[in-house]
Amino acid sequence: MFLSLLFLLGLSVGTIGTLIGVGGGFILVPVFLLLLHYSPQHAAGTSLAIVFFNALSGTVAYVKQKKVYYDAAIRFSLATLPGAILGSYLAHYFSSRSFYISFGMLLVMIAFLLYLRSTTEAEPVDDQALFPYNRFLGISFSVLVGFLSSTFGIGGGIIHVPVMIALLGFPTHTATATSHFVLAVSALFGVVTHYLLGSILLVPALLIGSGAVLGAQLGAYIAPKTKSRSITFLLCLFLFVLGFRMILGMQQ
């Protein structure tokens, strides 16, 4: 029964994450911390492994749909790598108190970014070969994305997608697909580093990850057919409350 619940958790996270263009780690880490009582290191490492499965599956689907903008995807992927490796090492030294408070603050920031994304929609672009964007700004944010992704096990799409839409002018579906490509590359390097540090619980990672793989395919299939603004708004509210719960809970 418990193993089935882990698989269903992965299925849900994979679907929602791919639908809104994120890895889903911001849902997994609180579950691991608050319900399963994992250490911060195991929560971050195991979550990032699942995020990798989700991102890889979603990327395959988006590549087939020809949604990935490779000019940005390759540049941003390379920029995330130093931060991805460094963040994995930093996570190893977190105390429970500092991780809870830091992650709670991150959730509040994520809620704001998601809300910003829900109110900002770029116009579609037909020819990606002529698509303009600020490469320096995109690469700079990608370095930060790689670091936060591995440090907290959340994946970087939660930051990347709003930045690509609001600041770089990407169409929504292009930003979602490109973000998944970047996340798959970044998470791979972070997962290897977390594994070498012993921070990944293999059985939960494989069970939840297998569910996330199927969920990612489902999310990528329905994403072009849905408007996720209402889902995003409810998720913003949930993350805002949960973020303050984690901050205040560790101070009591």
Image (cartoon, helix red, strand yellow):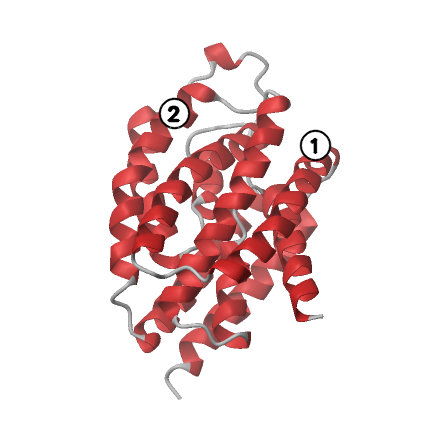
Which residue is situated farthest in the bottom direction here?
252
Q: Is residue 182 visible?
A: yes
Q: Position of residue 104 (x, y in %)?
A: 42, 68
Which residue is under mark 1?
224
Q: Is residue 27 left or right of residue 88?
A: right
Q: Is residue 165 visible?
A: no
Check the image and report above or below for 78 versus 13.
above
Instruction: First in sequence, mark 1 or 2: give its number.
Output: 2
Residue at figure coordinates x 57%, y 18% from the top left: 125
Q: Is residue 54 left or right of residue 81?
A: right
Say which amino acid is labelled 1.
Answer: Pro
Locate the N terminus by quadrant: bottom right
Task: Say which quarter of the image contains residue 40.
Answer: bottom left
Residue at figure coordinates x 51%, y 51% from the top left: 50
Say which amino acid is labelled 2.
Answer: Ile
Looking at the rendered structure, the secondary structure element under dot 1 is helix
Q: Position of residue 167 (x, y in %)?
A: 42, 34
**Which of the two discs, 1 and 2, sits closer to the camera?**
2
Looking at the rendered structure, the secondary structure element under dot 2 is helix
Q: Position of residue 10 (x, y in %)?
A: 62, 55
Which residue is under mark 2?
74
Locate the C terminus by quadrant: bottom left
Check the image and report above or below for 25 versus 1.
above
Task: Say which quarter of the image contains residue 140.
Answer: top left
Closer to the camera, 153 or 228?
Answer: 153
Callout 2 crowding tier (Cα within 10 Å): few <14, some 14–19, many ≥20: some
Q: Position of residue 66 (x, y in %)?
A: 59, 20
